[in-house]
Every structure is written in C-alpha cells, then in structure tokens.
Image (cartoon, grey):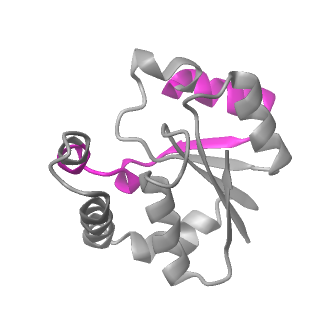
Amino acid sequence: MKVTTIGFSKKSLEQFVNLLKEAEVDCLIDTRLNNTSQLSGFAKKNDLKFILENFLNINYLHDKELAPSSEILTDYKKKLMSWEDYKVSYTNLLLQRKVQNRVDELLSLGKTICFLCSEHQPEQCHRSVLVDFIKQYNKQIVVQHLC
C-alpha cells in the first residue's frame, strides 16, 4: 500500500493538484489543527474539499486526532522545544489518542492515502512523524512525500 504526504504552502493550486494526480491519490486526510485560516488560500477546508471531491474524485477527510495539539505547536513555534522534543511529544499524543488502533481503518480509506499539512517540506513537519508512527503498525506501507 502506498501512503503519501503533502504540504500546500509554497505550491500553486496547479502544482498541488498535479502532485496528487501523479501519485494517484484517492483519499486526502487533512491533519491540520486549524484548516479554516484565510492564510490557507486554496487549502481552506471547504474550498479544498470542493476541489478534491468535485474535480479530482479524491475523498476529503479532516481528522483533528492526527493533528498536534495547540500546546505542542505553540511551544515548537516559539522555540520552547526542539524538533526532537516535538517528535516525542507528538508521538506520545498519538499514543494517548490511540491512533495505533486506527491504522487499519485509516489505510482502508483508499488505495493511495495522502496526509495533508501546511509545511512545504516534510522534514520538520508532523506528517513525517505521523507516517513513521503508522509504519510501526503496518510494515506493508511505502511512504512517498509529494514535494
């Protein structure tokens, strides 16, 4: 099973759509805590859902249980915690939320799942931590970060 991730920042709508189409994504799971900000441009929840479902035949789901908490995000953005501490805190949060019990459910949502966040690159983004976490519970997945 192929699992992908994508961030929308620093991408035009055309680039974003083409990356999803090339990867044959059929279900996008929005892992952002806040997906209605005006700063999200084309990736605001309702706009993104409309584009994906009506023009690309990609199911859209927003799952806040996969998002970092506002406390973790704030501490990281204010440099009160390192990237390593962020990864540990976020992973612990996923465990508290029992996301490990939902891995099969999440992976069954499509042939090619894509986890969405705002960060342009995956290296210091929770989506990379999320797919590493999921991979611990399903070794069959192959991860591709769409950049």
Residue at 44% in and 51% down:
125
In the image, the segment drawn in magenta is 44-73
Q: Quadrant of residue 129?
A: bottom left
Number of labelled discs? 0
Residue at 50% in and 82% down:
136
Side of 13 relative to 73 (left or right) = right
Q: Could you say where residue 132 lies in the image, as x and y percent from the top left?
A: 50, 71
Along the line of sight, the residue nearer the viewer: 105 or 137: 137
Q: Is residue 23 visible?
A: yes
Q: Is residue 57 visible?
A: no
Residue 70 lies in magenta, yes or no?
yes
Along the line of sight, the residue nearer the viewer: 67 or 9: 9
Side of 31 relative to 68 (left or right) = right
Side of 128 relative to 10 (left or right) = left
Along the line of sight, the residue nearer the viewer: 57 or 130: 130
Residue at 37% in and 50% down:
67
Q: Could you say where residue 39 lies in the image, as x and y percent from the top left?
A: 43, 18
Residue 114 lies in magenta, yes or no?
no
108 relative to 50, above or below:
below
128 relative to 49, above or below:
below
Q: Quadrant of residue 13?
A: top right
Q: Quadrant of the C terminus?
A: top right
Residue at 26% in and 64% down:
93
Q: Quadrant of the N terminus?
A: bottom right
